[in-house]
Amino acid sequence: MTWKVRHQGSPQSVEGLTLAQVVEGLQDGLWEPTDEVMGPGETEWVAIENHPQLAEIALDIEPPPPGTYDDETHLDMNPLIDVCLVLLVFFILTTSYAVLQNRLKAADVSPDKAGPVKLTKAQVEKQMIHVVVKMEDGHPVYRVENEVVDEDRLVAALRKYHREKSRTDLLLEHDADVPHGAVVAVMDAAKGADLDRIHLVIP
């Protein structure tokens, strides 16, 4: 009463085994649950895991760990990441430079182009509110159309000329020693009075 065992689909088999030897070989990993067995009096090969006498034993056997193989297609991603970062920085700098170039576009000096607009004194007096800031006794003094005005009254004075005399621009003249804060105060007042443009007379 001997058993035969063969690997799945193999034409060769091991004969003359007892049931105990088949079980021992299965537990030792010599056979796998998918290998085929033929018991005494049987005429067909049956997988060990499907054989009535061996099915329960095959279920208790843990499958062998999957084999590990060296991945010959492994790709080192570090150089690729470095190249991507360099390209990203390049594109950022290029885009920033293009935007900056558009903002700082030089004036066209072509003779076909008209030069800066020149206004006569009459036009200035009609269109602009003349504000002069000078240092007197160590303090900035504001004059709106030759009238001394306190800093906190600048908006009201500018709005008066803007509404009553329809002047839309501000002509700001100041000495070189006038603090920057005083100049900014006049500009803020011009915005508060809804004036369109501010023109500076460079000291």
Image (cartoon, helix red, strand yellow):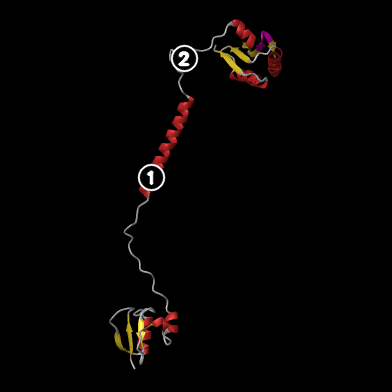
Q: Is residue 167 above or below residue 52?
A: above
What percent of the width, then of the height, locates residue 121? 59, 5
Sequence-wise first label, 1 or 2: 1
What percent of the width, then of the height, locates residue 164? 71, 13
Residue at screen point 37% across, 51% down = 77
Which residues lie in the magenta part?
Answer: 142-147
Based on the displayed image, in which of its 4 quarters is residue 185 positioned?
top right
The kind of secondary structure element at disc 1 is helix
Disc 1 from disc 2: Cα separation: 49 Å
* Quadrant of the image containing the C terminus: top right
The kind of secondary structure element at disc 2 is loop
The secondary structure that most of the magenta stretch takes on is strand
* Quadrant of the image containing the N terminus: bottom left
Q: Nearer the viewer, mark 1 or mark 2?
A: 2
The answer to whether 140 appears left or right of 7 in the picture is right
Residue 158 part of the magenta-drawn span = no
Q: Nearer the viewer, residue 182 or 91?
A: 91
Residue tagged by mark 1? 82
Residue 144 part of the magenta-drawn span = yes
The answer to whether 118 appears left or right of 83 in the picture is right
The mark found on residue 67 in the picture is: none
What percent of the width, then of the height, locates residue 197? 60, 18
Residue at screen point 38% across, 85% down = 23
Q: Is residue 178 above or below residue 28?
A: above
The mark found on residue 113 in the picture is: 2
What percent of the width, then of the height, locates residue 63? 41, 75
